[in-house]
Amino acid sequence: MDRLAAMETYVYVVETGSFSAAARRLRIGQPAVSKIVAQLEERLSVRLLLRSTRGLTPTEAGLAYFERAKRAIEEANEADLAARGAGTGLTGTLRICAAVTFTRLHVLPHLGAFLEMHPDLNIDVVLDDRNVNLVEEGIDVALRMGAMNDSGLTARKIGECRRLVLGTPDYFQRFGEPQSPIDLMSHQAVVYSQGGGGANWLFRQGSTEQSITVSGRIRVTAAEGIRTAVLAGLGLTLSSEWMFAPEMASGEVRTVLDGWHLPNLDLWAVFPTGRMASAKARAFINFVEQLLNPQVDPVPQ
């Protein structure tokens, strides 16, 4: 049995949900597809698919095999392209995951240029402020912010920005402008409770350090909600420059406590555990890194 061909057949069966649909894609007979999958199960000594009148469903072992088989096929295809000197001709589908607001403001408006460079490439964009399971969701690369606490992930830092305390001019006119971090305790804070956010804000000024626990009547799990609440004048917040970049430029929000420093926010490219970054993923990450840091030379493919 040709192992790679059997893997490809199985992947098509899972993706299409039937032997007949996989056979049409492979341009072979349905009995041949069924036989290949049966031989594969026999060689592995494990049931990969559950057959029923409603169709085919991968078993737990079958789903794990599907993810790894698909990865092996992609890497084999990339090896062929590299050998032919066609490494820049990206094809297929790239599946990325990133935070909603950051992607809406800083990635999606520029994707047209990336797609023009790679006309045979499609992109699936999964928007989620949570850290989703990359393998289960079939993600090729994720953009994540904050500290990387999971040492099992493969990650590369591709950017950073300042974090600031900000609000609308109207809010500061109504409630006053804090002159020191301690003043924040008398203000309404819109608290970002997802990931590395929270109510504990750490400020530094020279050798002085102050940790302030803010309070507020609004806690939000998504950055889009933080933006909406702050722009409605419901409170001030601690935010990255990325989250409010348009409003900072227009003056719709302004920063306070600029003489104090907060820890920068890091942006990471994260790849599924145990998986080499595909050429598609590397090209995309280099593109994003160039968007954020135009002065940085791109990493070789």
Image (spheres, rainbow, N blue to C red):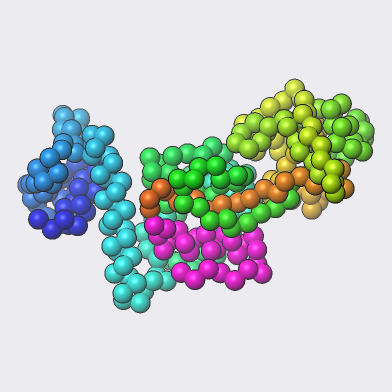
Q: Is residue 224 magenta?
A: no
Q: Is residue 166 visible?
A: no
Left or right: residue 3 compared with residue 193: left
**Residue interval drawn in magenta:** 276-301
Q: Is residue 162 visible?
A: yes
Q: x, y percentage for residue 217?
A: 75, 22
Quarter of the N terminus within the rendering = bottom left
Q: How many marks?
A: 0
Residue found at x 19% / y 38%: 48
Residue found at x 92% / y 38%: 179
- Quarter of the figure with residue 211: top right
Left or right: residue 136 compared with residue 237: left
Residue 142 or 185: which is nearer the viewer?
A: 185
Residue 94 or 191: which is nearer the viewer?
A: 191
Residue found at x 45% / y 58%: 281
- List the single residue furthest toward the bottom: 85
Q: x, y percentage for residue 251?
A: 83, 48
Q: x, y percentage for residue 192?
A: 67, 33
Residue found at x 53% / y 68%: 299
- List the single residue furthest toward the top: 217
- List the single residue furthest toward the front: 207
Q: Is residue 290 magenta?
A: yes
Q: x, y percentage for residue 70?
A: 29, 51
